[in-house]
Amino acid sequence: MNVFLDRWQFALTTIFHFFFVPMSIGLVFMIAIMETFYVVKKNDTYKHMAQFFGKLFLINFAVGVVTGIMQEFQFGMNWASYSRFVGDVFGAPLAIEALLAFFMESTFIGVWIFGWDKLPKKVHLTAIWLVSIGTILSAFWILSANSFMQEPVGYTMIHGHAEMSSFGALLTNPQLWVEFPHVLFGALATGACFIAGISAYYLIKQRSVDLFKRSLSISLVVGLLASVLVAAIGHEQGQHLVVSQPMKMAAAEAQWNTSGDPAAWNLIAGINETNHTNSFAIQIPDMLSFLSYGTFHGKVTGINELQAQEVKKYGPGNYIPPVTLTFWAFRIMVLAGTLMILLSLYALIRVYKKNLFAQSRVLRWLLWGIALPYIANTTGWIMTEIGRQPWVVTGLLKTSLGASVNVGIPSILITMIGFVVIYTVLAILAVFLVLRFIKIGPDN
C-alpha cells in the first residue's frame, strides 16, 4: 500500500510539474525569435509581441519552478531507498542543472525583465536567448538522469548501490540522444501551439490584428517544423527501445506472443491482461516490422517470451508492465501529435492563400489546439515511465524496493493531500493570471 500511494503521489506531482516545463522551454524560444525580428526589422510590433508573451512565460516559469522544488522533496521523503541507490550517479548532472542552467535562466530573466530600454537592443536580445539556452540545458541535464533510469550506463555497483564510473558514458547514453531531442522539439511545439491558440483568440475578437497575424504566422511555422521533428525522432526512439527496452515496446503494441515475419501492427486492440491475450485487434499488415526496424521484414518478440527471459535473468517475478495503460497512452500521444501536424499544416496553407484570418472556424480549431501538446506530453511520459515497470532503474532496482521503508501511510496521505491542495491553488492562480493578462492584451 505504501508503494502504491508513493507512486500515485509522484505521478500526480510529476504530471502537474510537466504541464509547465515544456511550455517554459517552448515559450521563451518563441519570445527570443520575436525579439530577434524586432532587432533585425526595427519594427515595434515585434517588441510588443515579445513583451506580451513574455508576461505569460513568466507566470508559467514561476509555477514550474515552485512545483519542481516541491517534487525534489519526494526523493528524500518517499523514495529514500531509490535516492541512496542512484545518488552517486545523479549527483553530477542534477548539480550542474541547478548551479549552471537554472542560475543562468534566473539571472538572465532578471536582465531581460528590467533591461527593456536600458540596455542596447542586441545585449537585451542576447539575454533572452541565454534564458532559452538555459531552459534547454536544464532539460538536457535532467533527461541525462532520467535516461540512466531507462538505460543504465557508466556505473559500477559498490556495496549495493550504483556509483558513477564514467561521466562521459552518461552523456553519450544512446537513450539520452533519442529522448532529449524528442522532448525538446515537443516543448517547442508546445510553445508554438500555445502562441497560435492565443493569437487565434485575438483574431477572432479582432483585437491587435496586425500583431497577432504576425505571431500566428511565426508560431505555425515553428509548430509545424517542431511537430514533424517530434514524430521523426519519436520513430527513431521507438526503434531504439525495441532493442534497449523490448518489454516496453511489446506492451505499447500489445504484442503478447512473438510475431511472424513480417509482423502486423495492432492499430487498436481489446486487451485481456489476465489471460495475456487480445480479445480482438484491428491490424495493419507488416507495419509493426517497419515501425520496429525500418523495413517490412523481421519478427517482434512478444511479452510472454520476454517475461520468460526476464525470469531467467533476474529471478521469479512479474516483469510485465500495465499493458492496457501503456498501449493506449502510446496511441493517444501519437494521435495528438498527428493532429498537431495536420492542424499546423492546414492553417499554414490557409495563411499562404491569404484567407485564414477571415475563417473563424480554423481559428477556433487553433484555440482548442492548445490542449494537444499537453495531451501528447502527458501520455508520452506515462508511456515512458509506466512501460518501464516494475523497474525504477531498468534491470537494477525495482520500484517496490525504491520506496522509503520508514514512512507510514498516514504521512504519505497527509503529504499527498497537501500537494493536491497547494497545486490546485497554484493552478487556479496561474490560470487566473494568464486569463487576466490575455484580457488586458498587449496594448495596455
Image: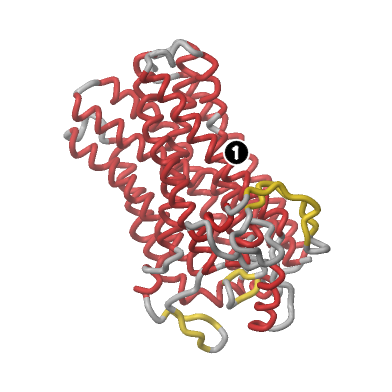
Farthest bottom residue?
A: 159
Visual colour scheme? secondary structure
Task: Write down the residue under mark 1.
Answer: 427
Across and down, in percent, residue 231 comes to 47, 46
The amino acid type of the residue labelled 1 equals Ala
Across and down, in percent, residue 181 comes to 41, 53
Residue at 28% x, 43% y is 129
Residue at 78% x, 60% y is 277
Corner quadrant of residue 304: bottom right
Residue at 45% x, 30% y is 344
Q: Is residue 223 left or right of residue 38?
A: right
Corner quadrant of residue 432: top right
Q: Is residue 401 above or below residue 60?
A: below
Across and down, in percent, residue 439 comes to 50, 19
Whether residue 77 is visible, yes or no, is: no
Nearest the eye: 251 or 29: 251
Q: Is residue 91 left or right of residue 159?
A: left
Q: How many marks?
A: 1
